[in-house]
Image: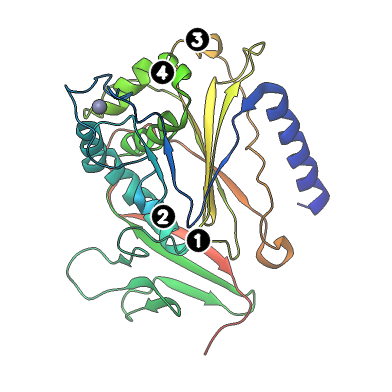
Amino acid sequence: MTEPDLNAQRIAAANFYETHYTGSDPIFLEPGVKLILGSAGSPRHCRFCGKNEPEVTFKDEAHALPAAFGNTGLFSNYECDACNHLFGEGIENHLGNWSKPIRTLSRIKGRNGVPTIKKPGRDKGWRIEYADAGFQLTEYEEEPFFEIDEQAKKLRFDLHRDTYVPVAVLKGLVKIGLTLIPEDETPHFRETYEWICDTDHSRDFVANFPVLRTFIPGPMRNDLIVLMVMRRRAEIDTVPYAFFTFAYGNEVLQVFLPSPSQDRCINGKLFRLPPFPIPGFSDQDKYGHPKVKVENLTNRQPVKNEKVTVVFKFDAAAH
Ligand SMILES: [Zn+2]
């Protein structure tokens, strides 16, 4: 695919979103930025379980985005301690396992630094970790997990993913969007809040809600997160009601926020949405073009021992 085609696609996608959606200003999270969503006035209200003080407490800092993604500055005043613990012990673990390979490769620092990926089990095996000087790749002969193609200047990783339940990952992503939406939008998502709070992941709720992932090759900042919520324009009834975009490291996720009442008009319809256009990224001639993948995260069975293949282009191999 040639460069002009990609630019034409980007312009077409920008026009599509401009016509169909309206968005709030993006949130740029970087070191030093602290932002607390919602009022600190009492009695506080939890938008997830719908309960108020003093029936529920609000003592803990509620991350609007899990700390694993490098969030040290965005919190909310409307997530009670009980919901905070429920998410932290449940869907955020699934989201953490699912996103770990990309977080490692993007050098995203969570509470304990950049996550290390190891061969599962206690046996000696491979591991990948990030230290101050760069990635440390340790490989043992029996178990090669990366290949270097010096001619094409490509490094290919086969990474292991810890067990996750896809629909629990989807709930974890939707939870971020439901934290970001303005208070006056929350009535449209009452059933969606109940669904993400339900620890029974076998419940039927969303049939077809794709997550669009764009992988941006090349060096990207590991300390900048950009979040944006988009809502369908009032006169439009041909596209899903709402979605949010979440850019960090080498990845941009576009996650739809299912609203049973507002999405009734598109039920049973087939539609194609272009991925939300991504603003400025690294040198494409050098590192390759961004790649879009549609993820279906509606399955309810645990996924075990999944391999994630990532290919990086590099300038020169160090010997
Ligand atoms: Zn709550």
- Horizontal side of 75 relative to 118 (left or right) equals right
Q: Which of the two discs, 1 and 3, labels the residue nearer the N terminus?
A: 1
Q: Nearer the viewer, residue 101 or 23?
A: 23
Q: Which of label 2 and label 4 is nearer to you?
A: 2
In the picture of the structure, the residue carrying the numbered disc 3 is 264
| 85 relative to 315, above or below | above
Residue where numbered disc 2 is placed = 70
Nearer-N-terminus badge (2/3): 2
Q: Check contact, mark 2 vs mark 3: CB within 8 A.
A: no
Circle nearer the N terminus (2, 4): 2
Residue 314, image x, y percentages: 60, 73
- Percent across and percent down for residue 177 are 45, 32
Nearer the observer, 233 or 97: 233
Please report contact status of discs 2 and 4: CB closer than 8 Å, yes or no: no
Local packing at callout 3 (Cα closer than 10 Å; few below 14, some 14-19, many 20+) is: few
In the current view of this chain or complex, which residue is farthest to the bottom?
319
**Mark 4 or 1, nearer chain start:** 4
Q: Earlier in the sequence, mark 2 or mark 1?
A: 2
Q: Which mark is residue 189?
A: 4
Asked if residue 276 lies left or right of residue 262, the reply is right
- Say which residue label 1 marks: 222
Residue 20 shown left or right of residue 183 in the figure:
right
Q: CA distance from mark 2 to mark 1?
A: 8 Å
Other residues around mark 2 within 10 Å, as few (<14) / some (14–19) / many (≥20): many
What residue is shown at x 63% (from left), y 29% (from top)? 273
Element class at badge 1: loop
Q: Which residue is depicted at the point 63% across and 37% down?
A: 276
Disc 3 marks a residue whose amino acid type is Arg
